Image (cartoon, grey):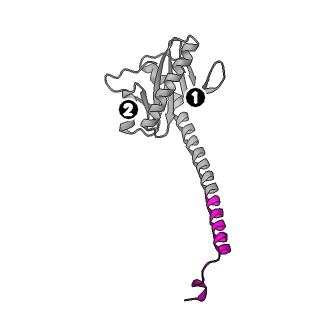
């Protein structure tokens, strides 16, 4: 065994080691922040891709089941407080006519938490609509590139339409007896 391994560490040596370790932790923290940022950007890109898959034919899908939508906002819409202009909600795709508005949340692989967030979003949209004397029916939908059975069931139970990737198109998944919730 070398003699240096048996020597006690000096206070200065310990402090130097702590500083070096702290520096490595800081570098790792910065690398993790950058990784998180990049993952966030990638997630947003998947969301944009999903929106581009959903938007082109979705009006036709809903009109085929009895809706008569004349307006689509495929790139999303931000909702702000009338007085303060504070951001309240954002919807990925909006379908509307004089009687109905459907707010569609698009996710690559939504989960039950995403459904819960959309429920809260729909409540906000209803409050905003009421403040503007907008008496249309507000309905919701969740669009998914990949939809789990759990999420699909929860979305339907919550009153949402479910739009799923099916081959090279999207399909509306409407179970027998489904009644959409109106906000």
Where in the figure is residue 137, as x and y percent of width and height? Answer: 48, 15
Q: Is residue 20 left or right of residue 47?
A: right
Q: Residue furthest left?
A: 176
Does residue 83 sit above or below 13 in this rendering? above
Q: Quadrant of residue 6?
A: bottom right
The residue nearer to you, when weighing 23 against 99, is 23
Indicate yes or no whether the magenta region holds residue 164: no
Q: Which residue is mark 1?
A: 90
Q: Residues within 10 Å of mark 2 (few under 14, many from 20)?
A: some
Stretch in magenta? 1-28
Where in the figure is residue 24, as x and y percent of width and height? Answer: 63, 63
> How many dots with numbers?
2
Q: Earlier in the sequence, mark 2 or mark 1?
A: 1
Q: Which residue is mark 2?
A: 154
Does residue 139 sit above or below 170 in this rendering? above
Does residue 4 sit above or below 134 in this rendering? below
**Residue at image point 48% right, 29% down:** 118
The Cα atoms of the two marked residues, 2 and 1, are separated by: 21 Å
Where's the N terminus, which quadrant?
A: bottom right
**Residue at image point 40% right, 30% down:** 155
Q: Which mark is residue 107?
A: none
Q: Is residue 29 left or right of residue 167?
A: right
The residue nearer to you, when weighing 36 against 99, is 36
Indicate yes or no whether the magenta region holds residue 10: yes
Callout 1 secondary element:
strand
Instruction: Kindly report the secondary structure that dominates the magenta region of the rendered protein.
Output: helix
**Residue at image point 61% right, 85% down:** 4
Where in the figure is residue 86, as x and y percent of width and height? Answer: 64, 26
Q: Residues within 10 Å of mark 1 (few under 14, many from 20)?
A: some
Determine whether label 2 and label 1 are within 8 Å by CB: no
The residue nearer to you, when weighing 153 against 112, is 112
Q: Quadrant of residue 32?
A: bottom right
């Amino acid at each position: 065994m070398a003699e240096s391994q048996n020597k006690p560490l000096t206070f200065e040596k310990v402090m130097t080691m702590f500083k070096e370790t702290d520096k490595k932790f800081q570098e790792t923290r910065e690398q993790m922040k950058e990784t998180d940022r990049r993952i966030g950007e990638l997630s947003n890109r998947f969301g944009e891709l999903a929106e581009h898959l959903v938007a082109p034919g979705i009006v036709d899908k809903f009109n085929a089941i009895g809706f008569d939508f004349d307006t689509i906002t495929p790139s999303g819409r931000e909702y702000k407080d009338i007085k303060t202009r504070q951001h309240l909600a954002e919807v990925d795709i909006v379908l509307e006519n004089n009687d109905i508005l459907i707010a569609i949340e698009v996710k690559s692989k939504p989960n039950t938490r995403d459904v819960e967030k959309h429920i809260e979003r729909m409540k906000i949209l209803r409050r905003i609509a009421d403040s503007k004397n907008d008496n249309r029916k507000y309905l919701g939908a969740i669009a998914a590139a990949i939809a789990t059975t759990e999420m699909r069931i929860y979305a339907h139970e919550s009153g949402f339409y479910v739009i799923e990737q099916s081959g090279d198109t999207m399909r509306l998944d409407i179970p027998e007896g489904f009644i959409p919730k109106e906000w």
